[in-house]
Image (cartoon, grey):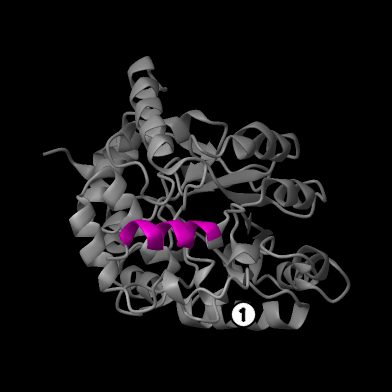
Amino acid sequence: MENMKDLVAKMKSRVLGKTGLKVKILGVGGISPQNVVEKALEYGLNFYDVHGYKDAQGADGRDRFKNAFSKTNLKRPEVILTARSAALTCGELLGDLDKTLKMLDTEYLDLYGLYNITQAAGRVEKAMGPGGALEGLKKAKAAGKIRFIGGVSGHHHKEMLQLIKTGEFDAVMVPVNIFDQDVINEVLPAAKKLDMGTIVMKPFAKGIFTRAPEAALRYVFSCDISTAIPGMLALSELECNIGIASRFSGLSVVDMTALKQEADEISKAEGNNICRQCGYCVPACAREIDIKNIFYIERQASRYYSRDWAQKAYAEVVNNAKKCIECGECEKECPYGLPIREMLKKAHADLAI
């Protein structure tokens, strides 16, 4: 069996833009459970998203990292930590930051930014305006609570371009995979021009790529990025990704063929309305419809399982698509502009017994 520490040691590092921080090309996503974080620290990965994502048991990502880090002999400067706040005002952001520092038991974060502020109209303007979240980030940096401002995270490429071009951020966090060509062709070059670090989330398009995952990850590494931070839910995923990253030397024709083949298969099954399973739509639904799970069942049925399986799984969804009142609030929160109401109608028609 390959020695994971040796593989991480020979893994390529890249500079995170104008921060000057050297990061391994593979980092650790914020949804990763504590046992994965513990092993990642032991193996020598140095970049961690410590945002407050909850795991299946409800444990906060900050607690998971703190507990994992406390079991190591590492010194705080040996790891690079990034987190974000969904706050739009200065005071709220500083409050979020202080809570995060306390939960992590650290005096500073290497990067701190804005969390997905581009989902709805008015959020960008409020965060960037007088008394906004950006003002809080600047105060935090002046006080030594954060070293760099970023990464600002979001999915709408036009609004991310708007934020990048302000020159206020040191790093940006965006989804990069074969389906996100607007990000690859426009957002990454804009960030490069301003020497911003580029942190990649969702390299597997939130689990869409299952038959060519190695090719999907190498595809991301071949883009002009600093580091990729997939969420890894099992040790096997961590070790597989370390193996891929440690051997990365480029994207082969075989990789690209496999990736395009699976992407074509996905597009054939789902058309242009590909749900990334981010779940941003769910809290917006007044009827508490289990939108994310419904689209997951539909995908599994179209690609892997039988119609009978899907119908049985859908029958167990308490808040199914039949409850939709077509208010459209979910669509306002969808970072990919999906016609969720129409998709729910289709899912119900396809899956209801």
Q: The N terminus appears in which quarter of the rendering?
A: top left
Quadrant of residue 267 in the image?
Answer: top left
Mark 1 surroundings within 10 Å by alpha-carbon count, few (fewer than 14), some (14 through 19), many (20 or more): some
Instruction: Decide whether the magenta segment is chiefly helix, strand or loop.
Output: helix
Can residue 61 be found in the magenta stretch? no
User: Does 103 appear above or below 241?
Assistant: below
Image location (x, y in percent) of residue 250: 42, 22
Asked if residue 161 lies left or right of residue 283, the reply is right
At x 65% / y 48%, what residue is drawn?
19
Image location (x, y in percent) of residue 213: 32, 38
Q: The C terminus appears in which quarter of the rendering?
A: bottom left
Instruction: Please name whichever residue, 109 or 90, is drawn nearer the observer in this view of the structure.
Output: 90
Instruction: Please name whichever residue, 180 or 34, is drawn nearer the observer in this view of the structure.
Output: 180
Residue occupied by mark 1:
96
Specify whether residue 22 is in view. yes
Instruction: Please name whichever residue, 229 or 319, is drawn nearer the observer in this view of the structure.
Output: 319
At x 43% / y 58%, what residue is drawn?
277
Image location (x, y in percent) of residue 23: 49, 45
Image location (x, y in percent) of residue 266: 39, 38
User: Does 87 appear above or below 244?
Assistant: below
SS at badge 1: helix
Asked if residue 306 lies left or right of residue 84, the reply is left
At x 40% / y 50%, what residue is drawn?
230
Q: Which residues are magenta?
A: 342-351
Can residue 346 be found in the magenta stretch? yes
